[in-house]
Amino acid sequence: MVYQIYPRSFADSDGDGVGDLPGVVAHLDHLSALGVDVVWLSPAYRSPMDDNGYDISDYTDIDPLFGTLADLDALIAGLHSRGMKLVMDLVVNHTSDEHPWFVDSRDVSSPKRDWYIWRPARQGHEPGTPGAEPTNWGSFFSGPAWQFDPASGQYYLHLFSAKQPDLNWENPAVRHAVHDMMRWWVDRGVDGFRMDVINLISKTYPLVDGPVNGPGGLCYDPSMVVEGPRLHEFLRELNQEVGIDDRELFSVGEMILVDVEQARSHTAADAHEVGMVFTFEHMSIDAGASGTKWDVVPLHLPALKANLAQWQEGLADEGWNSLYFENHDQPRSVSRFGDDSPEFRVASAKTLATTLHLLKGTPYVYQGQELGMTNAGFTAIEQYNDLESTRFFAEASAAGGDPAQLLGAIAFKSRDNGRTPMQWDASPQAGFTTGEPWLRVTPNHDTVNAAAAIADPGSVFHHYRALIDLRHQLEVVRQGRFALLLPDDEHLFCFTRTLGDEALLVVANWSSSPVPLPAGLPSLAGAEVLLGTHAFSPGDDLAAWESRIYRLA
């Protein structure tokens, strides 16, 4: 199991209101007690923090906000002594515009000019004027994906913030510099990498206009920039040069718009690219007709089941699944897919966990998920820090959007929902800091916190411990074949896992009402309940948000 730590929100050791590496080290026993195998650390590199660390200005140093390289060494040692591994976030589609590489590249005569993607203004247009951008691409953070640089009279490409210029992976010197940096971290003791938006690194040349489908005559079509023609080549080269396979390093690629076939091509044993990929398909199940994250519709459970089953079946024999419902870019799953009311928060958090951990693949738990942490509950745009959310609100409001509706969508889907401080105890700042936190603490921390969860044997935390232990113990959980049952049922998520003569049945009620055990399930005669969320007697209906794991006779 992989546990993701977002360092600025995990634990603050010095009272400045921002989490840091010594804070992480101080809580390693919490991770050990949970049963964590691998820790994925979100970026702690030097950064101007335009996008909370995903804009890196020095790949081989720790930002003073988080500590020092010595603190990182202490984290590695602390994890390794407890039998855990450390995976670093690798952000190499782009750098910060304050990275020395980019600063040098602004000089048209610099050898590093070709380390980034520079282009002249569109023919017939005055450089720096609206519409003069080399293509009509929009960035993922809205607005044009090109930024004019007056000093050189040209534009540079940034698929994200203007302070995150894209690297030119066509240049071998860029790739060699990335490989050198990765080897430097591995030699320091890092056990692998989570590769941020890695399927954007190969662009399709020449760069051309796309269909207009957004405001300002822009093209917001990610398919134009994903899975470029040299992506497999670049990933194989990286794997070989860094020794991903040879040194048995952990590797997972975050891949936008990747489908099952593409994922299999990247993760097959003979591909020699990455160990697994993050897919986004199931994270858009609750998006409306527009397809944007802010167009929110109620979850249709059969659609989610169908998508997860497609990935389970598609990677059953070749490739590997990454299993997640939360991360630093997503809202809290108990608020999104479950029921975060006081009555059902614990049960629904447990049942979401049961479902996820009994699928085939590697489960990822985001900090606080093991406590059933909820969405932030912010009520004003001023309370948000997330660049994506604040830009959306400003632009949509300027276009005439209803502020109340916009705030409702942001309250449900903003990335800040997953970035509020970790809730360690019931003290005023949730035990996260003795100072003023960089982002407001969720108000329910007085009841939803690690101290209370650890003390309560019926808590979400202890259910996660039991699920992780089950995965460690049973080969059928790790390797068994998945088969979806009752695909059209709108309340129940049921499936089997089988390996040889051993078979497990998972029944999960994804609703806030009791549901009878339906016909069409395998016989429960002689079955043993390995783990359940509720006490029950044979033949009992499933309570609201109840789940059970049976070992079939």
Image (spheres, rainbow, N blue to C red):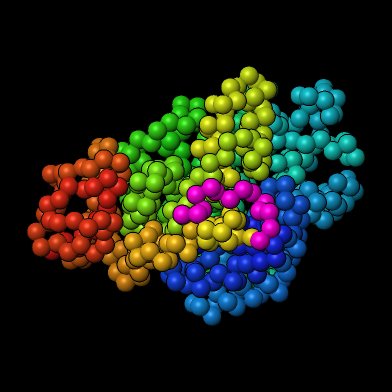
Residue 334 in picture, x, y percent from top left: 42, 47
Q: Which of these two is toward me, 542 or 98? A: 542
Horizontal side of residue 27 vs 359, given as left or right: right
Picture layout, residue 451 above or below residue 262: below
Picture layout, residue 480 above or below residue 227: below
Image: magenta residue range: 434-447
* Residue 436 among magenta residues: yes
Q: Which of these two is toward me, 147 or 51? A: 51
Residue 294 visible here: no
Q: Residue furthest bottom?
A: 81
Q: Which of these two is toward me, 445 or 70? A: 445
Residue 152 visible here: yes
State the residue at coordinates (30%, 41%).
Answer: 512
* Residue 359 among magenta residues: no
State the residue at coordinates (90%, 40%).
Answer: 151
Horizontal side of residue 156 vs 464, given as left or right: right
Picture layout, residue 484 above or below residue 222: below
Residue 23's quadrant in the figure?
A: bottom right
Residue 328 in picture, x, y percent from top left: 56, 51
